[in-house]
């Protein structure tokens, strides 16, 4: 599932997706079907389906709800009879700014081989400090109907993989109410709430997705999650002085995505 505005999607061409993969692009900025078809050219024959879905803001809304209403629109579609995939990858169109492409490639390869069994996995390399603010307490209570105990600790920027069981653990009504909450943003200062989100109420949801999909409020760093396969216990954002294990460990070179680039190189050599 790709929440898209204007960033190009050619970076997706590099991946060898599982044969039954459906790639659904939720167009938030009215780019149109012709432009979508151009962006998907390199994926023809490498996914079971590529689907274009325009998704706008609520009628009369002055808010820009970003990936939130795209992700929730997809979940609502799935729970309304379309069917929830075994695993769903949620990404922004500018994913390379936030994720290590090799880590996504590792997850995709694991899905293809049938060995992937992680119910919820954050893909972003940047982690937020743990927070407990009046704004987050308000949004947490509005979203989940319970008081926040402790702090919220999670990763930045809303790129993650979720299992079917975690998605289906909450009702259609829950996700519909969540969509309505983000679309109307009663927690925004301009609406009488306590959050300084200006016209972008989706930002605070970055702190909640892990909890919505069944993880504890203060989610441990991947490196400390003993239940994760070792290969996914990767840390190291822009603030880290350590070299990325995804780049310097010899075995991970196998997971650097390069399907499309490699095919281009082979074509040039044949010429």
Image: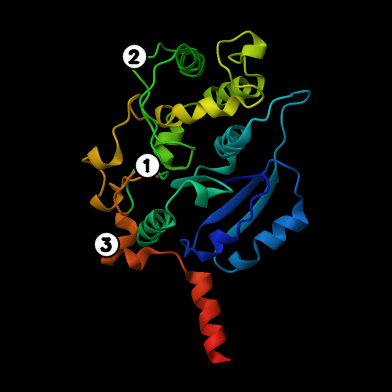
Q: Residue furthest left?
A: 226
- Cα separation between marks 2 and 3: 39 Å
Name the residue carrying label 2. Answer: 149
Q: Residues within 10 Å of mark 3 (few under 14, many from 20)?
A: few
Q: Which circle's residue, 2 or 3, is located before the other in the chain?
A: 2
Residue 154's x, y, as percent?
38, 31
Name the residue carrying label 1. Answer: 239
Q: Residues within 10 Å of mark 1 (few under 14, many from 20)?
A: few
Q: Residue at x 56, y 23 (%)?
A: 178
- At mark 3, the secondary structure is loop
> Mark 1 near mark 2, Cβ–Cβ under 8 Å?
no
Query: In this rendering, would 76 be left or right of 114?
Result: right
> Mark 3 near mark 1, Cβ–Cβ under 8 Å?
no
> Is 100 situated above or below 199?
below
> Is 139 situated above or below 90?
above
Q: Nearer the viewer, residue 98 or 171?
A: 98
Name the residue carrying label 3. Answer: 249
> Is 1 situated above or below 139?
below
> Does residue 13 appear anywhere in the picture?
yes
- Could you say which quadrant of the image residue 150 lies in? top left
The disc at residue 90 is none
Q: Which circle's residue, 3 or 1, is located before the other in the chain?
A: 1
Q: Residue at x 77, y 50 (%)?
A: 32
Q: Residues within 10 Å of mark 2 (few under 14, many from 20)?
A: few
- At mark 1, the secondary structure is loop
Q: Which circle's residue, 1 or 2, is located before the other in the chain?
A: 2
């Amino acid at each position: 599932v790709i929440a898209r505005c204007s960033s190009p999607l050619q970076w997706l061409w590099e991946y060898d997706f599982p044969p039954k993969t459906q790639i659904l692009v939720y167009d938030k900025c009215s780019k149109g079907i012709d432009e979508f078809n151009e962006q998907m050219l390199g994926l023809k024959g490498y996914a079971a389906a590529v689907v274009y879905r325009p998704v706008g803001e609520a009628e009369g809304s002055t808010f820009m709800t970003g990936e939130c209403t795209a992700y929730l629109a997809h979940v609502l579609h799935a729970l309304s009879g379309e069917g929830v995939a075994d695993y769903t990858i949620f990404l922004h169109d500018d994913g390379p700014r936030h994720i290590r492409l090799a880590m996504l490639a590792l997850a995709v390869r694991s899905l293809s081989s049938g060995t992937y069994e992680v119910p919820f996995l954050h893909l972003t390399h940047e982690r937020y400090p743990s927070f407990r603010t009046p704004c987050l307490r308000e949004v947490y209570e509005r979203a989940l109907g319970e008081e926040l105990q402790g702090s919220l600790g999670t990763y930045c920027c809303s790129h993650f993989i979720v299992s079917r069981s975690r998605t289906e653990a909450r009702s259609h009504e829950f996700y519909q109410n969540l969509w309505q909450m983000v679309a109307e943003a009663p927690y925004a200062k301009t609406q009488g709430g306590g959050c300084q989100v200006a016209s972008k109420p989706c930002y605070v949801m970055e702190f909640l997705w892990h909890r919505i999909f069944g993880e504890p409020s203060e989610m441990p760093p991947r490196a400390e999650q003993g239940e994760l396969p070792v290969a996914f216990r990767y840390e190291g954002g822009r603030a880290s002085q350590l070299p990325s294990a995804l780049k310097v460990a010899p075995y991970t070179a196998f997971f650097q995505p390069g399907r499309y680039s490699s095919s281009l190189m082979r074509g040039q050599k044949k010429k």
